Image: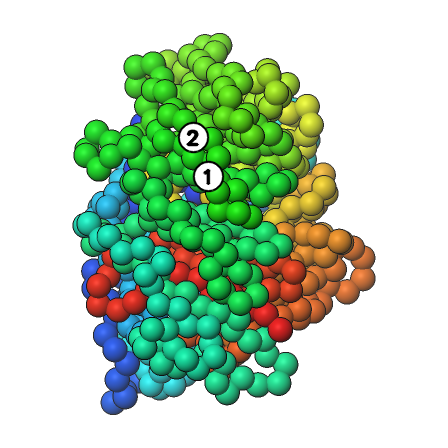
Amino acid sequence: MTQPTDPPPQGGNGTPRGQQPQPPQGGFGAPQDPRATPAPPPQPPQAPPTPPQTPPQPGYGYPQQPAGPYAPQPQPGPYGGATPPQQPGPYAQPGPYAQPGPYNAPAQPGPYGTAPQPGYGYPQQPPNFPGASTPPPGGGRNPFKGKPAMIVGAAVAVLLLVGGTVWAVTSGGGGDDDKKPVARKSGGATATASDAPVDKGDGSGAGGEDPENLNEGRKDGEAKVLWYKSAPKAPGDGADAPGMWITDKTAVKAVYKELVAYDVGTGDASWDPITFPQKICAVTHQKTDDNKVVVAYMNGVSDNATCNQLQQVDLTTGKKGWSTKVAEGDLFDSTLSLELALTGDTLMVGRSQSGTAYDVNSGKKLWDKKKYGSACFPSAFAGGSKLIAVSSCGATTSDEHDEVQRLDPKTGKAEWTKKIPKGWSVARTYSVDPLVLYLTDEDHKKWNISTLKDDGSVRSQVDVDESFAPECGWAILERDLQGCTGVAADDDTLYLPTEAKTGANEIVAINLDSGKEKWRVKSPAEASMLPMRTEGGKLLAYVEPTYEAGGRVVSVATGGGSHKPSTLLQNPQGTAEIENGFYSRDIDYVDGRFYLSTARLTGSTETKQKLMLAYGK
């Protein structure tokens, strides 16, 4: 049925997932942190405990009435076409990590960390701007969900869960370029990492502070803990640990003011920590083919400090390469925060309203991406095999909208430009090749997942009645286009995890030509299973730990036939609680080893915090 041009999206039903991206604001604001105090230590229960429930708070993405049998039905959205009534759809919980799920409960006190406290940049009330969302209610994830209350009470303290619903949107299938996304409602610490104790899991502990043997009681068939690292001290208001890169010999982690490197097999220091004058504020998600990355750090600690210092680092040797200062842009175009993206030999540095490209090998400036067209300001970039730019256009006009461009990394020339219909914002890129966009409609509290062709036209829109749940970080002052994990794509398929309300979830394979479901596979354990990436015709996924077992890495055949998960690495049950307790995590599986690290330190001084854990056979 022919739709009018750019009709205003109406309601529908569904509930967007809590771990969802935050589209832009004037300068992306921080999400609310509902945590007040760490959970109490475990006590023998006198009666089955009842976890208290916290009602959803108002703010972006929170409907005034819950979705249910009387929720409004979806109407045509920005890319045209109507969808049938939907079940609660992807991303139907409050902001990032806010849904009560098996791994989104507060961390418990213990030798490896406590539930995080609110830190710098995280306001106590939910901001009202596009895509503002709520952070995790606690530092760990709850492997005991769905167990009898008496068992849970004996094992862990009462957990405070935060729940809520949001209207969502999705699509009505693939189509022409003129289709519109169809809506479905829906402190001053100075210690360094080199000072931190280390436990290799051999029973020797970590400087006398980690007496337990992490491999004690390991069962046949279980992987072993190769090494474990405690985190350095962080300021009282917390600190970011924003990057993790794995090479064939070295695991490198960015944490607060440092880069630290460990031998992948033994955990021994690969090279001396690199300490920066001020805190790290941005890193490249990618590394070059010869294992180079670029790190940005602050130029001071005052309220006027900006994120304008760049340093290239060789991950293999730990040697610093070139360094430079990022110039400020025009009025309102600041380096308060940066987004860094790598495509081939081109490093793209995004300010708030423009970008500058550098040769990643020499640091030589290549070109600028500035204001163009009808007041279009490039505000975010995504890298990889392609270079993608997202711009905010017409902010002071009635035609305010986003535009997406694919850029030639050598020259900065736009190969194509796609105008996003009015009212919709590009929040994340789930993949850059193929290009899969996660879009949000602030006014109507809706979402849409669209795939674009090589010429920028619409290839398809996700049309699956499901609540999806990738994990996305907190976009504080930028969009952070590539800040999501738990989602993967190959040439013709998108892989998204469903929300696990109790126990196991599923991964759904979605045809990128039609937006329809191809197949789905259930987690082999009573826990969430998250896609990591595809390789060799298989999907690699991480299954989170449970009360009975550690996490595991599995592979799933992506072609025809059976899609039953096959276990590649089974982590030990003895470290399930530690594995579960990593807060705001990074994960990777390389050469038969599984790496897990935190992406943020809380600044707690009561107990040591975890930094990194490696498993292998």
Within the image, what quadrant is residue 44 found in?
A: bottom left
Within the image, what quadrant is residue 612 found in?
A: bottom left
Q: What's under tag 1, amino acid-wise? A: Lys
Residue identifier under label 2: 323
- Whole-percent x, y for residue 449 in the image: 56, 39
Residue identifier under label 1: 320
Give the structural element (helix, strand or loop) at label 1. Answer: strand
Quarter of the image for the C terminus: give it.
bottom right
Closer-to-camera residue (604/168) = 604
- Whole-percent x, y for residue 558 in the image: 74, 55
Pointer 1 and pointer 2: residues touching (CB < 8 Å)?
yes
Q: In this view, does 340 lie to the left or right of 158?
A: right
Residue 58 higher or lower than 350, as above or below: below
Closer-to-camera residue (545/8) = 545
Within the image, what quadrant is residue 430 found in?
A: top right
- Whole-percent x, y for residue 579 in the image: 45, 69
Q: Residue at x 50, y 56 (%)?
A: 270
- Whole-percent x, y for residue 512 in the image: 69, 41
Quarter of the image for the N terminus: give it.
top right
Residue 348 higher or lower than 200, as above or below: above
Q: What's under tag 2, amino acid-wise? A: Ser
